[in-house]
Image (cartoon, rainbow, N blue to C red):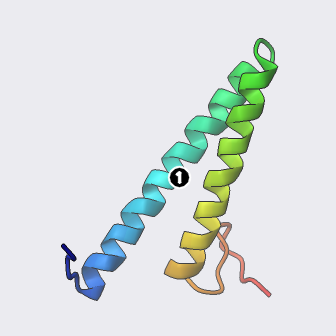
Amino acid sequence: MTEVVDSDELLRRMQRARACAVREERMWRTRRDELRPTDPEGSREAAVRTLAYEAVLRVLDEVLTPGRRADGTRSA
């Protein structure tokens, strides 16, 4: 069944998704750094997941704040 949501609720959901992606990206980046000396394969896997969450963040940033990058600068 399809749930109908208004634009405010959709915006809230996207903001929550972005916050979740920020937490996950940080967690995987930390895991990558921790695993690097002892588990190179695990570190590579964590690096791939870090890149995936970075991509999600770029997309959500563009949707939520068009033309503005995560670092606060304007895109070309």
Quarter of the figure with the N terminus: bottom left
Q: Secondary structure at mark 1?
A: helix
The residue sitting at 22% across, 77% down in the picture is: 2
Residue 65 horizontal/vertical position (percent)? 54, 81
Relative horizontal placement of residue 3, taking residue 16 as reference (left or right)? left
Name the quadrant containing residue 35.
top right
Quarter of the figure with the C terminus: bottom right
User: Residue furthest toward the front?
Assistant: 1
Residue to which mark 1 is pinned? 22
Q: What crowding class fits label 1: few (fewer than 14 Cα within 10 Å), some (14-19), or many (20 or more)? A: some
Residue 36 horizontal/vertical position (percent)? 79, 22
Relative horizontal placement of residue 65, taking residue 41 as reference (left or right)? left
Residue 20 horizontal/vertical position (percent)? 44, 52
Residue 3 sits above or below residue 37 on the image: below
Along the line of sight, the residue nearer the viewer: 32 or 49: 49
Relative horizontal placement of residue 32, taking residue 4 as reference (left or right)? right
Give the number of marks: 1
Name the quadrant containing residue 10.
bottom left
Residue 72 horizontal/vertical position (percent)? 65, 73
The residue sitting at 72% across, 43% down in the picture is: 48
Q: Amino acid at mark 1?
A: Val
